[in-house]
Amino acid sequence: MDSRGQPTSSRAGSSRHLTTLVGAGSRLKNVQWGEVASLLVPLVAVLFPLARMLGTAATSMEEGNVLVVASGILDGRLPHADVSYLYAPGSVWTVAGAFSVFGASVVTERLVGLAYRLLLLWGVHRLARRWGLSTAACATLATWAVLAPFGLIAYPWITGLGLLAAGTALVLDGEDRRTAAVGAGLCGLAVFHQIVLAPAALLVVVPAFATATDERRTRLGTGLVAGLFPFLLHMVLVGPRAMVEGMVVDPVVRLRAGRRLPLPPDPDDSGDFFARLDDLVRGPDRLPGLDRPAQIAALFWLLLAATLILLVVAWRWRGSGRSRLATMALVGAALVPMVLQRPSPNHLKFVGAWTVAVCVVAIAAPLGALTGRPSSRGTGRRLGHLGPPLALIAVLGGLAVVAPHHIGRFTVDAFTDAPMDGATATVVHDGRTLPVGRGASADAVADEIDRVVDFVDALTRPGDRVFVGPTDLTRTNYSDTFLYFLLPDLVPASRHVEMNPGLANRSGSGLAADLATADVLILTDRFDGWSEPNASTEPGDPVPAAVVANRFCDVGGTSTWRVLTPCADPGDR
């Protein structure tokens, strides 16, 4: 008994209990602050180039197509039914929803793209957190470093990958049944955004379903059905035939011959047109290492080798989180067909963004355990924290050495170029703003675009039909879809807003009939030099070109874009 009559053992037990609670609270606070820090570092990496990304040129066919199709939904033109669209429709429906609230703009579309990228990075972080917060931060940084050069376009592949990453994390962490259901729903939504992600989504949900309790299976199944349900709604709106033809037949059967690149990539010749154009414009590279075409080939083989090695590592993994690492490696393998059908620099980065994160985990965990072993000087614990940063340096450094141009230069430029400011050339027309780029050449292009859309406005009335395409309509390889976006009072004359080989120029595409209804054409020869080692160089149906030659007259324009209207009299030609 003590002086107050309390049992001594009771006081000692209370003291120990209090000490335990204080220690647990301190550890919890440290974990919370550590998690905040591990999320904050990638977030800063995202925010640093954000101003630049919002102001980069929006003149690519891919981004213009997202802008046009999404804004067209608000006018009643549905993807697959009224507009040719080669992907699952989730991305454009989401962007259309954002447009309905905030107005149609490039900034709104890119903020949607940013949201999907943040979802992707959060999913990677949560997946890698199993091996420590430092590993999670480094894996997330690796993903962002590879994706950052692509900007913020709400592109279906990246939007779908963001949903898949978040869904995978929640399914694997979903001991709570509601969390698992949400994860399965996100996996379903990933397929609704990019249908080629279906195998990867199944590799996540099916094993979880097979090993779950009956109640959890119900939750997983319900979540997956909910995620896929928008397909049914879209099918009701556009019809099953239009949906299947747009998502499957057009991209897989009709387009493939005109977009496929050689396998394996030729180390002496960049197959991708824009990679070839970049080689030509930049001239000989002063950076050390492989030539640019050889860099693409090296990245291709490196990606395949890394995917195979990760599968073997996951199978032989003896550390913690073996099943999680196996799932991540299998998802990476399921993404590889995206590269096999077109091994271009962009496709390599789309798939590589996932693979580099898994590589960082696979290197960081054993490296951290090795450097974290106790030494005679007691430095083991401190050195153990070096594993993830060393893994990040090894992965990104290795990529920069292999591809100093396609990874090194483009990644550095993404983080160091000047942000959007007064020197950024823009075109403002009918309440819509289009960034064109920086420099004297961008100013000249912006001036041309401004003159073209003003000229078209003077020739047309709201509701008139406009067509934008190449001068040579037998080769429909690319188009300036952004011009549709700058002319919101006009209606696209053709369902072929994008120009794709084997689609717009195929016999029976309907392009000739569409052109016959047009009130104004905007044609360019910018892409006449298109050259890829595939069927895109072969001429297609000559009838659309004949319609233009017989019915339309050149009434003006610029050196890049010519404007044509129906001739007053066929004899005027």
Image (tube, rainbow, N blue to C red):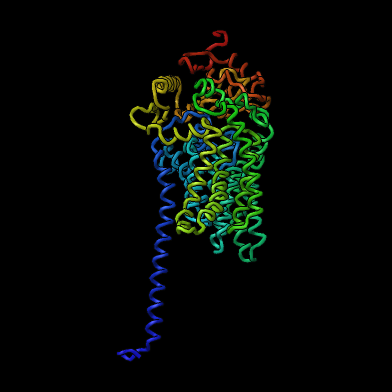
Residue appearing at x 55%, y 50% in the figure: 361
- Work out whether 319 lies above or below 251: below
Q: Quadrant of residue 28?
A: bottom left
Q: Position of residue 305 (x, y in %)?
A: 64, 41
Q: Position of residue 48 (x, y in %)?
A: 39, 40
- Work out whether 295 lies above or below 364: above
Farthest residue toward the left?
Answer: 3
The front one of 273 and 299 is 299
Q: Is residue 56 left or right of residue 311?
A: left
Q: Position of residue 437 (x, y in %)?
A: 42, 27
The front one of 64 and 308 is 308
The front one of 296 and 470 is 296
On-image quarter of the C terminus: top right
On-image quarter of the N terminus: bottom left
The front one of 289 and 77 is 289
- Work out whether 205 lies above or below 238: below
Does the rendering let one see residue 65? no
